[in-house]
Image: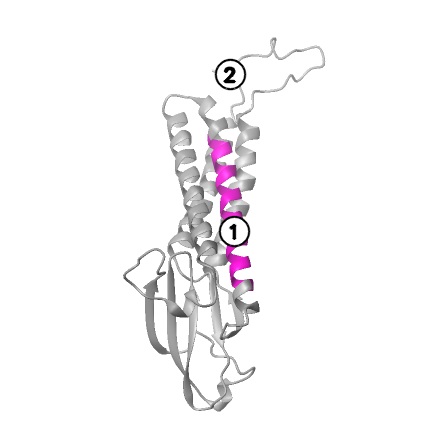
Amino acid sequence: MDESKPLKVRLTFFVILVGISLLFAAVVTDHWAVLSPKVDNYNTTCEAAHFGLWRLCTKRIFMHNQDLKEKACGPISLPGEHNCSYFKHFTPGQSSEIFEVTTQKEYSISAAAIAIFSVGFAIIGTICVLLSFRKKRDYLLKPASMFYTFAGLCIIISVEVMRQSVKRMIDSKETLWIEYSYSWSFACACSSFVLLFICGIALLLIALPRFPQNPWETCMDAEPEH
């Protein structure tokens, strides 16, 4: 039996927990993308926006002459009146026309649904790993590794759907936005993909049975793991 295997599993699981934390941060926050409209007049307010999978937040920012570099509203870190609302297709009683006019709700619903699948896979994988610690059920590490890999794939698909949504918003003739950027929630989602996908594969390799160390030794002859 490989005596270093439990240590490898725990180290890999620690990195996976970091990836899961980033995944949860990306899913529940609304800083995936920042949108800025064109500003034509000096010394006036403009309305920038940032959004995530569930909510759109707008911010009224007072712009001075020195703030206008590319005639875009922002940066959004400037002080201003802040207002958030959930997307209309998630909460029919609330309004978010500024978003509904310039994007397709199918993109938003798809990105959110795929992200939920990613969270579900990550939770199931974590349950499998924790159960494998209790009574040395190492066979649970293999399905856990696959669940983590699926979680990573789902979140990167959600990222791509969101990216296409933002691109279509900017390219739309009806849009009032002229500038966009991806924010820290988007970066958390991308980072969680890297950690979950790579560590999921690493956990699978760790969980595989020991290969024969000598040319004349077969898998049946190798010393079984306890």
Picture quadrant of residue 47: bottom left
The structure residue drawn at horizontal position 48% and vertical position 28%, both measured from the top left corner, is 143
Location of residue 74 in the rendering, given as x and y in whole percent from the top left corner: 47, 78
Earlier-in-chain disc, 2 versus 1: 1
Location of residue 93 in the rendering, given as x and y in whole percent from the top left corner: 27, 61
Location of residue 25 in the rendering, given as x and y in whole percent from the top left corner: 40, 53
Q: Which numbered tag is attached to residue 225?
A: 2
**Helix, strand or loop for disc 1:** helix
Circle 2 Cα neighbour tier, 10 Å, few/some/many (<14 / 14–19 / ≥20): few
Magenta range is 144-167
The structure residue drawn at horizontal position 49% and vertical position 84%, both measured from the top left corner, is 39
Q: Is residue 201 above or below residue 119?
A: above
How did the renderer colour the structure?
A: one colour
Furthest residue in direction right, as rendered: 215
- Out of 116 and 132, give the one closest to the viewer: 116
> In the rendered picture of this protein, how many numbered marks are placed on residues?
2
Q: Which numbered tag is attached to residue 222?
A: none
Nearer the observer: mark 2 or 1; the answer is: 1
Picture quadrant of residue 129: top left
Furthest residue in direction left, as rendered: 93
Q: Which numbered tag is attached to residue 191?
A: 1
- Out of 171 and 224, give the one closest to the viewer: 171
**Helix, strand or loop for disc 2:** loop
Taking the magenta stretch, the answer to whether it contains residue 155 is: yes
Amino acid at circle 2: Glu
